[in-house]
């Protein structure tokens, strides 16, 4: 019995000895392929993560650039607006000064004409030339100067209120 059983066992052992190395070789080969596959996929994932990080940094830089450009545009617009306001108030002040001077000159001329007319009429009725009088134009010059000073002061007060005094 042992011979027959032993003989069969020997045949199986021989067969196992023949197939054992091939199974072991295939297992090693499968392990190597798995390690290679995992390595390739790991490299691909690392590269994708790196590319994503680079893209995110570029987008962040672009966003910062846009924010900086927008900030500069707002600053430029504020300066332009301030300059326009200064120009507007300057023009209005100059117009008010000119109007005050013109009004003063016109009043001076009218008062001189009126004084001359009164002198002429007085001379007709009395027969004597009228005594020379101090011209009233000086009073109107002073009033014109005061109006110009008030206009300039009003302009300065408005500009200081708006924070644009200089």
Image: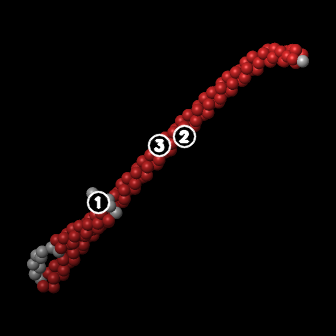
Q: Residue at x 58, y 35 (%)?
A: 49
N-terminal label among 3 and 1: 3
Q: Nearer the viewer, mark 2 or mark 1?
A: 2
Residue designated by label 2 = 56
| Percent position of residue 33, x then y | 69, 23
Asked if 37 appears above or below 58 in the picture, the reply is above
Q: Classify mark 1: helix, strand or loop.
A: loop
Residue 77 shown left or right of residue 163 in the figure: right
Asked if 13 appears above or below 134 in the picture, the reply is above
Q: Residue at x 72, y 23 (%)?
A: 27
Residues tagged 2 and 1 counted as in contact (Cβ below 8 A): no
Q: Residue at x 56, y 34 (%)?
A: 50
Marker disc for residue 165: 1
Q: Quadrant of the N terminus?
A: top right
Q: Disc 3 to disc 2, how far (Cα)?
A: 14 Å
Residues tagged 3 and 1 counted as in contact (Cβ below 8 A): no
Residue designated by label 3 = 65
Q: Classify mark 3: helix, strand or loop.
A: helix
From this viewpoint, is residue 126 visible? yes
| Front in this rendered view, residue 129 or 155 | 155
Circle 3 packing at 10 Å, graded few (<14), some (14-19), many (20+), is few
């Amino acid at each position: 019995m042992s011979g027959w059983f032993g003989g069969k066992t020997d045949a199986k052992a021989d067969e196992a000895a023949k197939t054992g190395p091939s199974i072991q070789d295939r297992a090693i080969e499968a392990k190597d392929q798995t390690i290679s596959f995992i390595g390739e996929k790991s490299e691909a994932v690392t590269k994708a993560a790196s590319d994503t990080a680079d893209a995110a940094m570029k987008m962040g830089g672009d966003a910062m650039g846009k924010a900086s450009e927008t900030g500069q545009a707002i600053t430029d617009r504020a300066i332009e607006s301030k300059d326009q306001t200064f120009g507007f108030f300057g023009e209005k002040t100059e117009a008010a000064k000119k109007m005050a001077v013109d009004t003063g000159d016109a009043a001076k001329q009218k008062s001189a004409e009126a004084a001359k007319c009164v002198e002429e009429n007085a001379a007709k009725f009395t027969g004597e030339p009228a005594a020379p009088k101090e011209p009233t134009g000086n009073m109107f010059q002073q009033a014109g100067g005061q109006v110009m000073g008030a206009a300039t002061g009003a302009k300065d007060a408005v500009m200081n209120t708006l924070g644009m005094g200089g």
